[in-house]
Image (cartoon, rainbow, N blue to C red):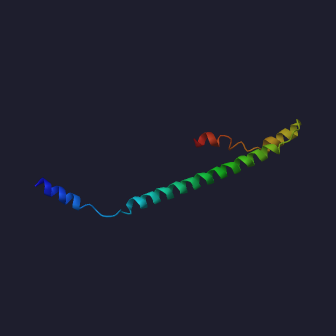
Amino acid sequence: MDDQNNVNVEGSAPSGTSAGPVIGIIVILVIIILGGLYFWGQRESDDTILNDTLDTINLQSDSDEVDAIEADLNATDIESLDSEINAS
C-alpha cells in the first residue's frame, strides 16, 4: 500500500513552471524602481532649497554699518531655521 501512495504522489507533480514567481519578481522590481525615483526627486528638491539658502547668505552685505546689518537681519528668514530639527 505504501508503494501505491508513493507512485500517486510522484505522478501528480505539475509539469512546467508557474508564472507566480516571475510576476512577484517583476512587482518587487517595480516597487524598488519607484522608491528610488521618489527618493531621487526628494534629494533634488532638498538640494534646490539648500542652494537658495546659500545664495541668500552670499547676498548679505560685508559692511559693518548698523543700517546694513539691520537690512541683512530683515532679509534673513529665521522662521525656517529649526525646520530640519522639527522634521526628525
Displayed quadrant of residue 85? top right
Residue at position x 79%, y 41% in the image: 73
27 versus 85 height, above or below = below
| Relative horizontal placement of residue 20, taking residue 70 as reference (left or right) | left
Residue at position x 22%, y 58% in the image: 10
| Position in image of residue 30 (x %, y %) | 50, 58
Along the viewing direction, whichever of 28 and 42 lies nearer the viewer: 28
Residue at position x 87%, y 37% in the image: 66
Along the viewing direction, whichever of 2 and 52 lies nearer the viewer: 2
68 versus 13 height, above or below = above
| Position in image of residue 8 (x %, y %) | 18, 60
Displayed quadrant of residue 80? top right
Residue at position x 38%, y 61% in the image: 20
Displayed quadrant of residue 21? bottom left
61 versus 4 height, above or below = above
| Position in image of residue 48 (x %, y %) | 70, 51
| Relative horizontal placement of residue 74, taking residue 47 as reference (left or right) | right
Task: Quadrant for the C terminus, please.
Answer: top right
Along the viewing direction, whichever of 34 and 62 lies nearer the viewer: 34
Along the viewing direction, whichever of 48 and 67 lies nearer the viewer: 48
| Position in image of residue 25 (x %, y %) | 45, 57
